Structures are given as C-alpha cells and as structure tokens.
Amino acid sequence: MTTEELRVNVEKALDEIRPFLQSDGGDISLLSIENDNLVKVQLQGACVGCSVNQMTLKSGVEMTIKKYAPQIEQVINVVA
C-alpha cells in the first residue's frame, strides 16, 4: 500500500467515526501518518474535554483505523 493509499484509508476510517463524534459536539482531524504505522489525530470540540476521550480514541478510532489500514500500530491524540 502506498503512502497515499494509506492516507485515503485512514481518512475513510475517520469519515466512518466522525458522525458519532459530531453527534456529541466533537470532531477529529488527521494530522499525520508517520513511518506508515503511527497515526496522529486531533480530537476537537466537545471531545477535547471529554473524560472518556482516551477510551474513544483506543476502542473507537484506533480500532476503526486498523480495520481500514491493518499496518497501523498506534493512534495518538495530539493536544492543541
């Protein structure tokens, strides 16, 4: 998979997750993909101060991204 294909697949995963985050007043954006196995995202809106955002990141975001791009090993949230 090329870097561009990887980016497209990660964006597809985020598009799948986004409606759930937006329904709670939040959102997510892709910042970067490093070494083709680390995804950096930024939770936005209500997600920033949410007490369960780490759970959302691991069980929701990371799991969905891995479904689209199995070579991704970790997803981290970069705090603004």
Image: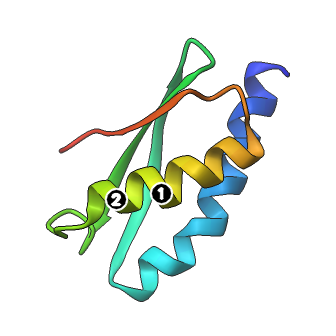
Q: Which mark is residue 5?
A: none
Figure quadrant of residue 79: top left
- Residue at 54%, 70% (x, y): give it: 18
Residue on which disc 1 sits = 59
Left or right: 50 in relation to 42: left
Residue extending furthest toward the bottom: 23
Q: Residues within 10 Å of mark 2 (few under 14, many from 20)?
A: few
Name the residue at the top extreme. 35
**Quadrant the C terminus occupies:** top left
Q: Is residue 42 above or below residue 60?
A: above
Q: Position of residue 42 (x, y in %)?
A: 34, 48
Cα gap from disc 2 to disc 1, whole angstroms: 6 Å
Which picture quadrant has residue 53?
bottom left
Crowd around label 1: few <14 · some 14–19 · many ≥20 (10 Å) = few
* Residue 63 vertical position relative to residue 53 in the rendered view, above or below: above
Element type at marker 1?
A: helix
For this rendering, which residue is in front, 12 or 59? Answer: 59
Residue type at numbered disc 1: Ser
Query: Residue 31: x, y in percent?
Result: 43, 37
Cβ–Cβ below 8 Å for labels 2 and 1? yes
| Front in this rendered view, residue 58 or 35 | 58
The residue at 73%/48% (across/down) is 67
Residue bearing mark 2: 55
Q: Is residue 13 left or right of residue 59?
A: right
**Location of the N terminus (image quadrant):** top right
